[in-house]
Image (tube, grey):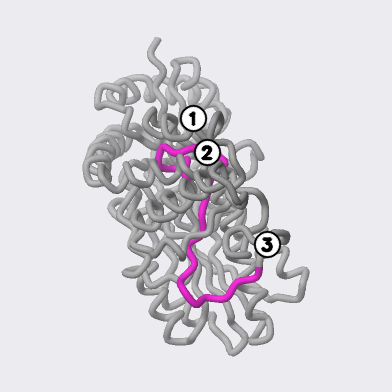
Amino acid sequence: MKRLYFDHVATNPLLPEVFEVMEPYFKGEFGNPLSMYDLGFTAKQGIDKAREQVGALINAKAAEIIFTSSGAEANNFAVKGLAMSRQNDGNHVIISKAEHHSVLNTARSLEKQGFVVTYLPLDKYGLVDPAAVKGAINKDTVLISITHANSEVGTIEPIQEISEIAREHKITFHADGVATVGNMEVDVKALGVDALSIAAHQFYGPKGAGALYLRAGQRILPLIYGGIQENGRRAGTENVPAIVGMGKAAELTKEKLPERMAHVKTLRDRCIEGLSKVEKVHLTGHRTLRLPGHASFVVEFIEGEGMLLMLLSKSIYAASGSACTSKALKASPTLASMGIPTSLTHGSIVFSFGIGNEMEDVESLLTEFPAIVGKLRAMSPFAKEGWRPEDMKTEES
């Protein structure tokens, strides 16, 4: 039975071309980039080239790229480092309820250090209202951090509008670009952000490699102290193979992004069209302002875990909520903030497509999923006449 992998928002396979450039740095070219001899020079050259490649992908200068171990580290680094660097100016931070846990939990840690955090709600499509951002600003606001796109519902946020508000009020602005960089066009200059988080495995690079774009001249305090690596902003011997791989993945993505976007958008639209016809299956997120390869739904009367297990029995891989929340078996804060009833948030299902998927794969999903829904719904004690999910309160209420 063919394996149908529809969880590309969680991670992606490593491209052969990427592994090929990484391999020498595991073997003969094993030097420390700080060493003053040829093995060190070769490693440093690999990192320097990768910095150029990643910068080119988002229209940034090489010097504006700081390598990290992951997108989560980049988010921690940005939220904590940017806020702490401006603590003499104020102690107020604004984020949304749609943020990844690496932003949410970092913001909560700042609260324990005396910062005040405003958590902005979402509308029914998962959008943050720029007017709400502006309304939350006060004299102590030093940082705004809003995700570029939410990995659970795929909605792309109005980052450019928010960045204009931040700039007008001289507030540092960070965006979590993990879900967008490599999956859609991202130009940091056009977006107007001061910082942007990136993860290599989101665009067919290696796990264990991420980056933070930091606009030239922007202050930040290190998250990890030690040596002079990354211009003194991120200590620790660099993961040279992973960084080199990230650079190559960025280069390939820049070359092929329009083609990739068109391909996965076609699959996404067919999935949404087909599954929206299934009774009591509802699309979540914005219909058009969403990631090109992302289709997310809630299903009445059924829990996500049951759907995932039955899909897996058909060799279909999907997600329920984000990769960082699905195992917690808790209602998604993103969906709850959108006003979706608690009963429905547990019935979340997400399909995200990649370059290895074909239309016949989606058609297989559209054949199998309605039968799975029917079987699970037949076993559900809630699937009875007269009961509606809106009868349940949301976790926000």
Q: Nearer the viewer, residue 62 or 375?
A: 62
Residue type, mark 3 in image = Leu
- Could you say which quadrant of the image residue 357 lies in? top left
Mark 2 in CB contact with mark 3 (< 8 angstroms): no
Q: Locate residue 18 relative to residue 260 in the image: left or right.
A: right
Question: Is residue 217 shown in magenta?
Answer: yes
Q: Residue at x 27, y 45 (%)?
A: 257
Crowdedness near tag 1: few (<14), some (14–19) or many (≥20) residues, C-alpha within 10 Å = some
The residue under label 1 is 23
Provide the residue span drawn in magenta: 200-221
Q: Is residue 99 left or right of residue 316?
A: right
Residue 394 on the magenta span = no
Location of residue 369 in the rendering, given as x and y in whole percent from the top left corner: 39, 24
Secondary structure under tag 2 reads helix
Query: Element at badge 3?
Result: loop
Q: Give residue 157's position: percent from left, percent from top.
A: 39, 62
Q: Which residue is mark 2?
A: 241
The residue that appears at 47% across and 43% down in the rendered structure is 244
Q: Is residue 97 left or right of residue 188?
A: right
- Pick whichever of labels 3 and 1 is earlier in the sequence: 1
Q: Earlier in the sequence, mark 2 or mark 3?
A: 3
Disc 2 to disc 1: CB gap under 8 Å: yes
Q: Are marks 3 and 1 in contact (CB under 8 Å)?
A: no
Q: What separation in Å lies between label 3 and label 1 (alpha carbons)?
A: 29 Å
- Quadrant assignment, res 17: top left
Label 3 sits on residue: 223
Q: Secondary structure at mark 1?
A: helix
